Image (tube, rainbow, N blue to C red):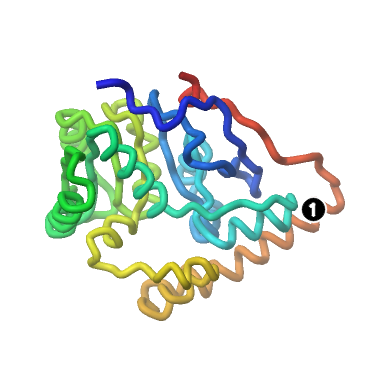
């Protein structure tokens, strides 16, 4: 089978948002024929990464960093005057599944419970029947030992997927993917967290109406107040503070243009 290529286009744009080069192009402009690590950044992950050096390094080292949140979209506009389109983990997940189904390709789900993985496979068999699917459910714990890491790597490499989806919650999944990227026999590696539960429908994602209004966060907060309160009510205001602080700094230092046209190694056919 031919290499998995979305489009034979070499360049895409990024915008510097705080410390990160955030993707600002159509997903169709990316050529995935060589290894590519995709992560997402939002206001919550930004604030967590400020206190977790390994997490920040993992985000920065990603080949593609998607703007997953209205906070990042607002930051790009406020700091650089750039209009950035929000691209959530669910968006890249759907995009890649559509391409894989067209190609008759393969994907692997690493993370979540056996029940969630079974529900994902059941739905895929109906919606994307041409995709070959594998999965592995790692132990539910804060950190893995060397033996557990090796078992996960072996499971992925035995299947050799074109796309590896990792759903082990942030920041664990991003740090794990960055650490083992070179050992994983997969072309595209995506850390997409809650998408596993959304797609399995064990957790309901807010409707397109709320997503388009930029209020997905508010619906998730209302549905899961205990789990989401700290993320949105504590880290949200902190992110706004950081944003205004960065804006004041940029006004006084008058930085140059921050939009870049990027050629990544994975984007060259």
Q: Which quadrant of the structure image shows residue 38? A: top left
Side of 219 where 110 appears, left or right: left
Q: Tell me if mark 1 has few (under 14), some (14-19) or many (20+) residues whose alpha carbon lies within 10 angstroms of its own.
A: few
How many marks are shown on the rendered structure?
Answer: 1
Side of 256 where 57 appears, left or right: left
Residue 176, given in percent of the width and then of the height, sits at: 34, 41
Query: What residue is disc 1 on?
Result: 249
Residue located 57% across and 26% down the image:
263
Residue located 70% across and 50% down the image:
82
Residue 140, given in percent of the width and then of the height, sits at: 21, 55
Residue located 46% across and 42% down the image:
54
Side of 230 where 80 appears, left or right: right
Foreground of the two, 149 or 7: 7
Side of 1 where 211 appears, left or right: right
User: Does dot 1 land on a helix, a strand or a loop?
Assistant: helix
Q: Which quadrant of the structure image shows residue 204? A: bottom left
Foreground of the two, 208 or 18: 208
Foreground of the two, 140 or 68: 68
Quadrant position of the N terminus in the picture: top left
Up-down: is 61 above or below 267?
below
Up-down: is 13 above or below 70?
above
């Amino acid at each position: 089978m031919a290499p998995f290529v979305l489009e034979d286009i070499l360049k895409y744009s990024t915008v510097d948002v705080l410390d990160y080069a955030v993707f600002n192009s159509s997903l169709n402009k990316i050529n995935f024929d060589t290894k590519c690590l995709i992560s997402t950044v939002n206001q919550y992950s930004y604030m967590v990464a400020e206190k977790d050096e390994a997490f920040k390094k993992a985000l920065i080292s990603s080949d593609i960093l998607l703007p997953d949140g209205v906070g990042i979209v607002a930051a790009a506009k406020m700091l650089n005057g750039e209009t950035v389109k929000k691209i959530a983990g669910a968006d890249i997940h759907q995009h890649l599944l559509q391409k894989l189904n067209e190609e008759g390709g393969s994907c692997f789900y690493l993370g979540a419970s056996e029940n969630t993985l079974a529900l994902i496979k059941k739905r895929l068999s109906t919606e994307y029947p041409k995709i070959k699917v594998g999965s592995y459910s790692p132990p539910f714990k804060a950190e893995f030992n060397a033996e557990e890491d090796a078992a996960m790597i072996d499971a992925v490499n035995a299947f050799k997927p074109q796309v590896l989806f990792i759903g082990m919650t942030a920041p664990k999944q991003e740090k794990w993917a960055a650490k083992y990227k070179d050992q994983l026999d997969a072309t595209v590696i995506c850390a997409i967290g809650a998408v596993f539960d959304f797609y399995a429908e064990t957790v309901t994602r807010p409707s397109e109406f709320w997503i388009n209004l930029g209020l997905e966060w508010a619906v998730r907060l209302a549905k899961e107040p205990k789990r989401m309160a700290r993320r949105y009510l504590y880290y949200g205001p902190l992110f706004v503070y950081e944003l205004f602080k960065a804006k004041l700094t940029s006004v006084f230092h008058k930085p140059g243009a921050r939009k870049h046209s990027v050629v990544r190694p994975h984007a060259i056919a």
